[in-house]
Image (cartoon, rainbow, N blue to C red):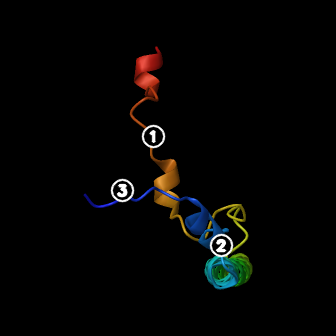
Amino acid sequence: MPAKKHFNPEPRSKNCQGFILLEVLVAMTMILGVWMASVGVYQRLALSLTQQESKRSQLRKDSDAFEMEEQNRTHLNLPNKGLGNESARMSSWNRSMRTSTQPSLKDKR
């Protein structure tokens, strides 16, 4: 009969003493790589948001300047017949129309 081998945990426990330095360095490198990529994505998003806000602000300023020029041009070209408060973008016939909810003079009697 062959001799039975006994399980000896001692040699295995000497070999498994935890992580080796190479494994720790690889894990730290992976974590650092993911963190750096995340920071890069955040910075690109922040930069694009800042650029969009700058463009929106410039468009608003340009639109305001155009509206002021149009208003000034319209007020200079209008004859003084009490039309000074009329907007340049809405014709006068739109303002004189009654809505269907307002009763006519005949209905008030």
Identify the image quadrant of residue 58. Answer: bottom right
Give the residue at x 44% y 25%: 103
Give the residue at x 65% y 62%: 86
Give the residue at x 53% y 64%: 90
Which of discs 3 and 2 lies nearer the camera? The answer is 3
Q: Nearer the viewer, residue 10 or 42?
A: 10
Give the residue pinned by disc 3. 4
Give the residue pinned by disc 1. 98
Q: Residues within 10 Å of mark 2 (few under 14, many from 20)?
A: few
Give the residue pinned by disc 2. 19
Image location (x, y in percent) of residue 63: 66, 79
Which of discs 1 and 2 lies nearer the camera? The answer is 2
Point out the residue furthest to the front here: 1
Q: Nearer the viewer, residue 94 or 39?
A: 39
Which of discs 1 and 3 lies nearer the camera? The answer is 3
Mark 3 and 2 residues: CB-CB less than 8 Å, in contact?
A: no
Check disc 3 and give the amino acid type. Answer: Lys
Q: CA distance from mark 1 to mark 2?
A: 85 Å
